[in-house]
Amino acid sequence: MILWREGRVRALGRTWAGAVELEVELTGDGTRVRALAYPALVGEPVVGDRVSLTVSALARGLGTGGYALVAAIPDRLPADPPPGPGHVVKARYTPLQPMLLGVDEQESPWHEALREADDLGGLPVVVADLHSALPAVVAGARAEAARTGAPAPRVAYVMTDGGALPAWFSRTTAALREAGWIAGAVTVGQAFGGDLEAVTVHTGLLAARLVLDADLVVLAQGPGNLGTGTRWGFSGVACGEAVNAAAVLGGQPVASLRVSGADPRERHLGISHHSLTAYGRVALAPADVVVPVFDRDDLAGLGTRVADQARALGAPTGRHRLVEVLTTGLEDALAASPTRLSTMGRGLDQDPGAFLAAAAAGVHAARLRAAGAAPRR
């Protein structure tokens, strides 16, 4: 279940919005571990603090979640927050459940705007399996806008709860916000820590349009994902439900394919079985499935494989519209990302097809926006 440890903070490391890295010396054996604290939950750590840690993911050697996590600073508990509105509880019935102001709840200043809201007005919603697709999708959308001389899109990130629950865990989100690449993040379901909190994907999408004034949305789980090597046992199955949510609200779902030319697992080579299952079996509403067309000789085989696999998602056997997007020039756009590109431990050089496929989805979404599919401000 949970492995607990106690230790002392010996050094402070990197900080970003909502999070701080620590070096902690464990009590007993003196081992030093990399730890992460969320000050909004446990208070601001300082060197010398005694901290209570959970180390389960670290002990199992998990990649994304491989931190010791600060559960409490027991000798110096944070002061009570000032009274304020909000009764939405997330990470419910866990010891660190936060109570937050939901964008859609009765005490919210946006409640009336969202109370009967029911229409995204054609807002392009790019749905992606992995969090690592987020900067690549935005890079593609910005590159397309720049190519045509249009202003950069106002992008909102809707973060679902299939991976990390605290948005603060994501250095990517913090860097994109700081660089002005996204207007904000909306955390939905059990996820929390975004610029706005929403109860469901549906109200999260509506808040992205009506509160953040987005003309393009990227929807993906937070960092980390869960998979069991089975057909249905993976967190990315929610991509199909997200397509349904975007469609029922009058948005334009754009399906970003999870693609890899370097994954050692056969089920993830070309188009991952996660995308084929989520879009092919779970999504009941039609979406634009973006099929990347690579212009590099070394990606020719990958491109052929992706095109062949994608046919199962389009007519006449599938319900979606296949949209081919040439990836020429997108590598430069990806290289300009304000945050490091990494998917399953592989960077742009190791697995370019993964990021080019996501960037191609961003290109198509930007074209939909330019064509007037997005709401006009």
Image (cartoon, helix red, strand yellow):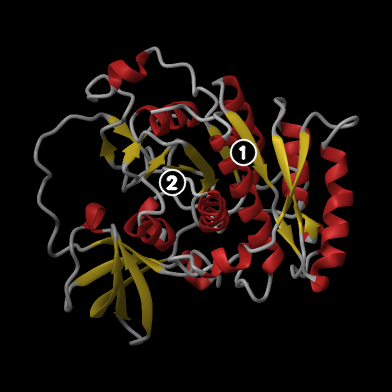
Residues at badges 2 and 1 in contact (C-beta under 8 Å)?
no
Q: Residue 346's x, y, as percent?
A: 62, 72
Write the residue at 37% across / 85% down: 31
Q: Nearer the viewer, residue 286 or 95?
A: 286
**Element assignment for label 1:** helix
Determine whether 126 is above or below 66 in the image: above
Determine whether 282 is above or below 327 in the image: above
Q: Residue 131's x, y, as percent?
A: 54, 54
Q: Residue 142's x, y, as percent?
A: 50, 53
Q: Which residue in the protein does label 1 denote?
A: 238
Q: How many marks?
A: 2
Q: Residue 209's x, y, as percent?
A: 41, 30
Write the residue at 38% across / 76% down: 34
Badge 2 or badge 1: first in the primary sequence = 2
State which quarter of the image contains the C terminus: top left
Determine whether 157 is above or below 252 in the image: below
- Rendered image: mark on residue 350: none
